[in-house]
Image (tube, grey):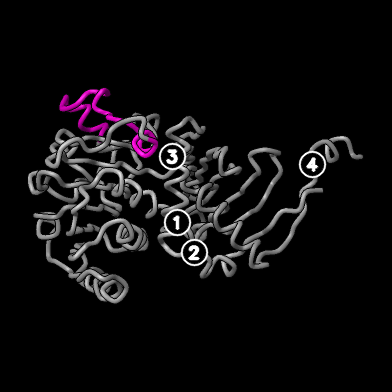
Amino acid sequence: MPETLFVADSDVVGLAEPADYVDAVREGYRQRGEGAPAKPRTKLLNDDPPGMFTAYAAVLPETGAMGGYMYSAGFADADAWFVTPLFDADTGEPLAVLDGARMNPFKTGAAGAVAVDALAREDASTLAVVGSGAQARGQVRATATVRDFEDVRVYSPTAEHREAFADDLDGRLDAAVDAVPSSADAVSGADVVVTATTASEPVFDGGDLEDGAHVTAMGQYHPEKRELDVETIERAVYVPDLRERVTQDAGSFLYALEQGAVTEDHVHAELGEVVAGAAPGRQSPDDVTVFDSGGTGIETAAAAHMLYERAAERGLGTEIEFAPASEALTGE
């Protein structure tokens, strides 16, 4: 029977820095841009008890891994649980099962950072972030590894939250991190804008965006919810993680489409196509670029494989066994 490694949450602690996640995820998107298979999430909603069960996956042939997330959120205990199965892309054997919650902000932040590296101006020095939760922290820490920011401005509606966020990250980054009283104060003049919220309506006015700004929107993946307004989508060189996801749950794009501001041809390219050099990214210093991130198996499988290899090298994790179907189904 193949030996599979269970990597617990305690094993994940300290295995990788934000830059390590960015390197792994960039390589995953490059493979996607060259044809690696990936599909958008499947999200199942339950009414009683209320909750969400979600799954998505990708195959990364050159990494030699395939896998993704299966996770539940809400339900009776109102908590969330992230399970990450990882398989060998050559043999199909199970390599590992990871407790995936701890890596979530880092692997998602890494996808945003890969987009910033591919689409933002090289001289970007001011970062605005709207949101102050774990995902916003992951985005900022990862993005700070691909650009030399001098100033980071954070806004969220609760003053205590944005101030705590600024205090925490001010000691982690080389940049000065400040809490500001409005999204306009954060976004105006910013070279890079990150939205990481649970908002249902736009979190900043597209008119406040400077020419040449890049936006990473990662807080919403619901067809009727949106972080970005029509003006932002209309102005943008629009790049999603997966083209197929756009018409499924990219609420900001779907609303702009319904309003007649854009057509489906407004989708410029997938992020992987830009990373792989199969499509251009920014073509002018004045371009406004948008990366619409809904979460995929690409960053999940890439990050999980990196963590699995590091855990194995350090003798971490617990070996478990799976019976191959050829034995289990026949009873032999």
Residue ID at (50%, 59%):
101
Of the residues tagged 4 and 1, which is closer to the observer? 1
Residue ID at (71%, 63%):
318
Q: Which residues are magenta?
A: 253-276
Instruction: Specify whether residue 286 is painted magenta.
Output: no
Classify mark 1: helix, strand or loop: helix
Q: Please state which amino acid type lies under the numbered disc 2.
A: Ala
Q: Quadrant of residue 293?
A: top left
The residue labelled by disc 2 is 16
CB within 8 Å, label 2 to label 3: no
Q: Nearer the viewer, residue 102 or 301?
A: 301
Count of labels shown?
Answer: 4
Distance of mark 4 from mark 2, alpha carbons?
32 Å
Residue ID at (71%, 43%):
93
The residue labelled by disc 1 is 21
Q: Is residue 323 above or below residue 140?
A: above
Residue 44, percent from left and from top = 49, 40
Distance of mark 2 from mark 3, alpha carbons?
21 Å
Label whose residue precedes the other's in the sequence (3 or 4): 3
The residue labelled by disc 4 is 324
Figure quadrant of the C terminus: top right
Q: Which mark is residue 30?
A: 3
Classify mark 4: helix, strand or loop: loop
Q: Is residue 111 above or below residue 58?
A: below
Q: Please state which amino acid type lies under the numbered disc 3.
A: Arg
Distance of mark 2 from mark 1, alpha carbons?
7 Å
Q: Nearer the viewer, residue 53 or 168?
A: 168
Distance of mark 4 from mark 1, alpha carbons?
31 Å
Label whose residue precedes the other's in the sequence (4 or 2): 2
